[in-house]
Amino acid sequence: MNIAMSENDLVGPLREALVVAAVAGMSGTLRVTGDPGGTIHLANGRVAGIETPGAPGPEVLLLRSRRVSEPAWDAGFAAAAAAGVPLGAELVKRGIIGSGELEALLCTAVADSMFVLASGTVDDYRAEQGPVDFVLPLDAGAEADWLLTETARRLQVLASLPVRPDRGRIVAASGAEPLDLRQGEILALADGRRTARDLAFALGRGVYATLLQLARMYEAGLLVTAAERAGFQPGGWKLGHSAPSGTPAPAGELPRRSKDPAALARRVVPRGRSRDLPASLGLLRPRGRRDVDPGETP
Amino acid sequence: MTEDKLLAEMQALRDRVAGITGTAVASRDGLIIREDTGGPDPDNLAALAATALALAQRLATEAGQGTLREAAIRSSGGHVAIYAVGATAVLVLLGDEGLDIARLHRESRATVDSIEKLLG
């Protein structure tokens, strides 16, 4: 399988939206309606930040993980607003976070949010040109090609995992003993009320990194789903990613591109339907690379 | 029986809106009717929510802004949203930082109506 094929298959309508925006060098927003939906902030065709209810943004990643204290954040926020300077620059100037660490965290946040958007359903998207209005933009912006490839890779991995971002509330197996502090944190929070997304917010970690950790613990018998605990079989998992609308492009054919952002803005994508991935994808597993998120010590 | 249906409505809303961490229904005089808060003390929550709703309604009236839709509180660690259920009860929703506010506005109305009918 080559990666270009899987992008077509997996990322869905957002793939074309991002490619078109990248080619046009668009600045502004792509408003994505769907579940979870969200807003993609673009700067010169690159992704500067993503807001979605489905994944923690930079503020949650920094504060909930206790990497940055609330008083330090508040002081930096107030000073940046008063001086009219970017918040990121102010946090770095104050020594609250290193510029490299901040950039890595923002990049991870963008990739995580894009993965979550693509793993859900996309009913529609709309492009609006304008200035970048995001609290902590990624200065250089994430390149669309890289982001799409990374998203496709993560969706492939997701297909092989026993957990989904927003479905299945997770509960600690009876008598589960954590092997380390991080497992202990998760077991303490896995009370049958939280999905993987909820745990990611509670921990201040990316949803993707949380899913990988949950899958390891699930396979080790430390976790079960609330449905399993109640006596149901976990056979009902479905991958809720959105399928591209209409007839899929033949293999190897690139989507039609438009350089006119106004034309992009007029486009309305019919509601994407969830469908299961081909069973063969279920066998794919990450190989030869370690997935690390900013909350994880490599 | 009504209480089970009440709890089912509250949990259904939690399933429909990403980021809701807990729910409670209280009387306007601040006594808990049914709760699924997931941690925070339901009795304290009920008392405070009833008071906050009354204050928010007076504030909206004072500002000449018509009928109160909801009282929403945003903190560094999440959200609290309070809705009037008829003239006798209050619905309290707790959410994390990522609570989908737009969806909550759309979805909560039907839940409030259903709860109002259940409470009769």
Image (cartoon, coloured by chain):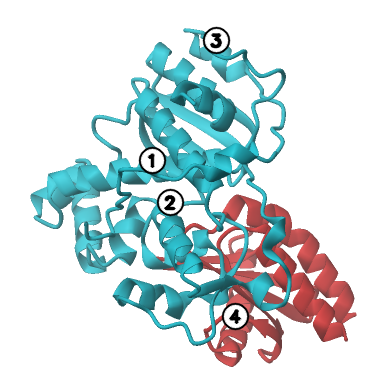
Task: Judge left or right: residue A78 versus residue A30.
Answer: left
Where is residue B71? Give x, y as percent. 59, 67
* Residues at marks 2 and 1, CA–CA distance in whole angstroms: 9 Å
Q: In the picture shown, does residue A76 fall above or below A218?
A: above
Q: Which residue is denoted by mark 1 in the rendering?
A: A111
Task: Judge left or right: residue A1 versus residue A250.
Answer: left
Residue type highlighted by circle 1? Ala
Colour of chain B, in one word, is: red
Q: Secondary structure at mark 3?
A: loop
Residue type highlighted by circle 4? Thr
Q: Mark 3 and 4 residues: CB-CB less than 8 Å, in contact? A: no
Q: Mark 2 and 1 residues: CB-CB less than 8 Å, in contact? A: yes
Residue for point 46% across, 29% down = A29
* Residues at marks 2 and 4, CA–CA distance in whole angstroms: 27 Å
* Residues at marks 1 and 4, CA–CA distance in whole angstroms: 32 Å
Return the disc, 1 or 3, that comes first in the chain's sequence. 1
* Residues at marks 1 and 3, CA–CA distance in whole angstroms: 25 Å
State which chain disc 1 sits on.
Answer: A
Q: Which residue is denoted by mark 3 in the rendering?
A: A253
